[in-house]
Amino acid sequence: MASENQENQLTPRKYFKTNIIIYLALLAGPLVYLIFKFPDSINTDLNVEQHLDSQTYIAILLTFGGVIAGYFMYLQLVSKIDLEDALSIKMAKLQTALIMKYALLEGPAFYAFFAYADSNNLYHLFLGLLPIMVMLLYFPTQEKLKIALKPNRAQRQQLDKVDQIIT
């Protein structure tokens, strides 16, 4: 019973792993869709000369809007992390900010890939790859997460002891 309760407790190692799993899951969704859908489009003519249609304009707006909104929403949510908060509260707030940032990149990528599957317009493919490339830059390393958490000295020591339960 005690070991089962201890397994459910939050440690820095579990927190860092959880953030990486969330990141990879949100990154994998559009890529898996594209991997399964792309072979279907190889057998058809790719539209390079197609004029910009409404789907393309929507994909452009969503892509750049998602990148910009994700960045600023992340900054806003991280700025709400109070220096006096407990480490577990800081971790929860940062995780929420990360999920929002990743989701605002994943959505436009999905839309652009769906539009690409519908029209074979290469603009949509490139517009879908843009947020994926931006998302690759946001890989959640331990150092990035530690900086964003704004830990005080005691919290930094807790984070350095990766298998210690966070209180």
Image (spheres, rainbow, N blue to C red):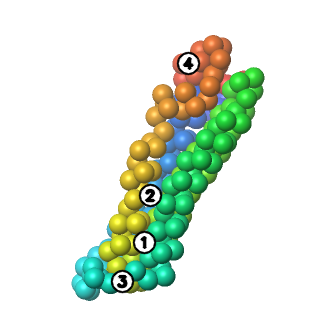
* Image quadrant in which you'd find residue 32: bottom left
> Could you tell me how far apart the alpha carbons at marks 3 and 4 are, in whole angstroms?
57 Å
Q: Earlier in the sequence, mark 3 or mark 1?
A: 3
Kind of residue at disc 2: Pro
Crowd tier of the residue under label 3, counting other residues whose Cα lies within 10 Å: few below 14, some 14–19, many 20 or above: few
**Residue 163: percent from left, percent from top:** 56, 23
Q: Earlier in the sequence, mark 2 or mark 4?
A: 2
> Could you tell me how far apart the alpha carbons at marks 3 and 1 are, in whole angstroms?
18 Å
> Could you tell me how far apart the alpha carbons at marks 2 and 4 are, in whole angstroms?
34 Å
Dot 1: what SS? helix
Dot 3: what SS? loop
Q: Earlier in the sequence, mark 1 or mark 2?
A: 1
Dot 2: what SS? helix
Kind of residue at disc 3: His
**Residue 133: percent from left, percent from top:** 38, 53
> Could you tell me how far apart the alpha carbons at marks 2 and 3 are, in whole angstroms?
22 Å
> Could you tell me how far apart the alpha carbons at marks 1 and 4 are, in whole angstroms?
42 Å
Q: Is residue 92 visible?
A: no
Instruction: Identify the residue position indicated by label 3 in the image.
Output: 51
Instruction: Identify the residue position indicated by label 4 in the image.
Output: 161
**Residue 161: percent from left, percent from top:** 56, 18
Residue at x-position 51% and y-position 38%: 17
Instruction: Identify the residue position indicated by label 1 in the image.
Output: 113
Kind of residue at disc 1: Phe
Instruction: Identify the residue position indicated by label 2 in the image.
Output: 131
Kind of residue at disc 4: Lys
